[in-house]
Image (cartoon, rainbow, N blue to C red):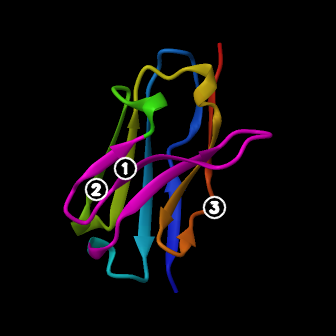
């Protein structure tokens, strides 16, 4: 049974930073592309960033230059470093492995 457990969300002021983590278990983590998605109230879930098994990354235009996705295959963990956060980044952030979702972690950017 695959499990994805996110952590690291919270309340931060505009311009601040957070680092999200997603710990995976129950699969051969290193072979999968991993993704971070987010869903704001009243909006569809959207892809924020992804990282392939080989380390190739993709980002939504809205987060390019501010967010960095990375992975540690030895720890079965994928990270999302979020800098210069904006109020419009407020959402529930989800980790995804093909076919599986984590439970989500709330990120709120507000003064």
Task: Name the spot of residue 7 as percent of width and height, x first.
Answer: 51, 51
Mark with earlier residue (2, 3)? 2
Based on the picture, tell me whether residue 46 belongs to the magenta stretch.
yes
Mark with earlier residue (3, 1)? 1
* Up/down of 83 relative to 39, above or below: above
* 4 displayed left or right of 77: right
> Given contact means CB atoms under 8 Å apart, are the residues at marks 3 and 1 in contact?
no
Q: Residue at x 62, y 54 (%)?
A: 104
Q: Residue at x 48, y 51 (%)?
A: 36
* 46 displayed left or right of 29: right
Residue that mark 3 sits on: 103
- Whole-angstrom CA distance, mark 1 to mark 2, is 6 Å
Q: Residues within 10 Å of mark 2 (few under 14, many from 20)?
A: many
Report the front residue among 40 and 13: 40
Residue that mark 1 sits on: 79
Q: In this picture, which residue range is highlighted in magenta?
A: 31-59
Task: Name the spot of residue 17 as percent of width and height, x first.
Answer: 44, 26
Residue that mark 2 sits on: 71
Q: Residues within 10 Å of mark 3 (few under 14, many from 20)?
A: some
- Whole-angstrom CA distance, mark 3 to mark 1, is 15 Å
Q: Residue at x 34, y 46 (%)?
A: 58
- Whole-angstrom CA distance, mark 2 to mark 3, is 19 Å
């Amino acid at each position: 049974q695959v499990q994805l457990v996110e952590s690291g969300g919270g309340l931060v002021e505009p311009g601040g930073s957070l680092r999200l983590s997603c710990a995976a278990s129950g699969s051969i983590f290193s072979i999968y592309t991993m993704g971070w998605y987010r869903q704001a109230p009243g909006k569809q879930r959207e892809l924020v960033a992804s990282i392939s098994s080989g380390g190739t990354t993709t980002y939504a235009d809205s987060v390019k230059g501010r967010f960095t996705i990375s992975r540690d295959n030895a720890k079965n963990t994928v990270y999302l470093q979020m800098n210069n956060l904006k109020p419009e980044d407020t959402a529930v952030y989800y980790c995804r492995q093909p076919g599986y979702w984590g439970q989500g972690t709330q990120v709120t950017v507000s003064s």
